[in-house]
Amino acid sequence: MPSWLSLPAPAEDRSLWLVAGDAAAEAAALRLAEAWDGRFGRLLFYLTTAADRGRPAAPPLRRAAAPLLLRPVLWLALRRLRTRAVIAIGPSMGIGRALAAAAPGMGVAVLGWDGVGDPPEALAAAVLQAARENPRGRRAGGLTIRAARRAVASGLPFGLDRLRVRKLADLQALHEALGWPETIVCIGSGPSSNDDRCVAAAAGAATAIFRVKHRWLAEGRVRRADVAFSGTAETAYRLPRAIVLIQDRETAARFVLERAWRGGFRPSVYGVVEDLLPDFQSAVGDGARLTNGAAMLAIAAALQPKRLFVGGVDLYRHPAGAYPGGPAVANAYAPAHDAETETAFALAVLQAYRARGGTLEAIGPLGDLLADRQGK
């Protein structure tokens, strides 16, 4: 990108973009970042001030220079920083007004604070809500998304949707598509996904491999997925032979819309978890949602294979960090998820599978928690 656009480098995680109107507001931004660091899981804090002082911001703040004040450039900057909310602090300034005008077009919330005292709890609640909402959902609308919703619900006239996507109707259709596997290997994205036991389990006969998204293509030792749990067409593009399972119908509609414009000649086979498992609900209260890893465990257990192996679902408790290869990001959930809810859900699903007579092996922190439960 041309340097004169002053675009920020892509952020490795979701962020808040703080805009400080003067020195007092900059000090308030630091108080806010220090008070909230880690409170919402993996959430970064970027700061833009009235004048770029050419020095790093005090951690946990990261400095972001003001981009060129053109709406398409600001949209690109918001996207690169994976911004969930813009917070204007203190006196109004040009970049703050420009971002406030541009942010809704990207589905990003706009908030304000006078910078006096400690950050108020009302602001924290608004940030949590903004961080848990998917900006793609906020900006979805119009005839195209309505057509995508119809494709998910009942299909388009003349089967036009089947040119790009083919939907699995129910759990039995998924079972048939997988060839009724006797063993299902569920591999999350945590460090234990590269354990020798995962590699050995994935090499077994009569096995279906379930994975989360596709980042493991770069870092994983097991490089196959029969089913991938994701809400984006990027996963379908990267894994053209995998069945993609999406948690809810609204996300599935966006998936169908994105898939319609993606390249590739092979139609994507997909399913909606809340249709395959009518009791499954991705929303768990307070705006939080279950992860794709939780959906993976629910589907795998519902298929009731003879043997279920689980690795890499480390609940962000593994001492090696969030992902294999080092602590590139904070070892915590994204703001959309709740750690206690995730843990309780995973344990309940796997304990119920074992109670129905299935043979279960789980490694990593999740395996340790299950062993503790079984020993009590």
Image (cartoon, grey):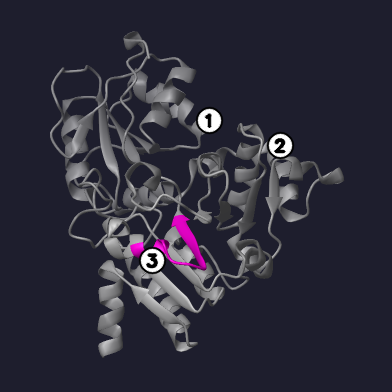
Q: On the image, which quarter does residue 16 sit in?
A: top left
Provide the residue span drawn in magenta: 200-211
Residue at 53% across / 68% down in the picture?
A: 299
Which x, y percent locates residue 63? 22, 27
From mark 3 to mark 2, how far is it between C-alphas?
Answer: 43 Å
Q: Are marks 3 and 1 in contact (CB under 8 Å)?
A: no
Looking at numbered disc 1 in the image, what kind of residue is underneath it?
Answer: Gly
Q: Which residue is mark 3?
A: 201
Mark sitting on residue 105: 1
> Which marked residue is nearer to the observer: mark 3 or mark 1?
3
Q: Is residue 202 left or right of residue 367?
A: right
Asked if one can make out residue 213 in the rendered structure from this viewpoint, the answer is yes
Q: Amino acid at mark 3?
A: Ala
200, 238: nearer the viewer: 200
Relative height, residue 10 to residue 115 (above, below) = above
Please indicate whether residue 282 sits to the left or right of residue 326 in the image: right
Image height of 128 relative to 9, above or below: below
Q: Quadrant of the N terminus?
A: top left
Secondary structure found at label 3: helix
Q: Secondary structure at mark 2?
A: helix
Residue that appears at 35% across and 54% down: 189
Q: Is residue 202 magenta?
A: yes
Disc assigned to residue 144: 2
Residue 318 in picture, x, y percent from top left? 22, 61
Please tell me how crowded label 1 is: few (under 14), some (14-19), or many (20+) other residues with Cα within 10 Å.
some
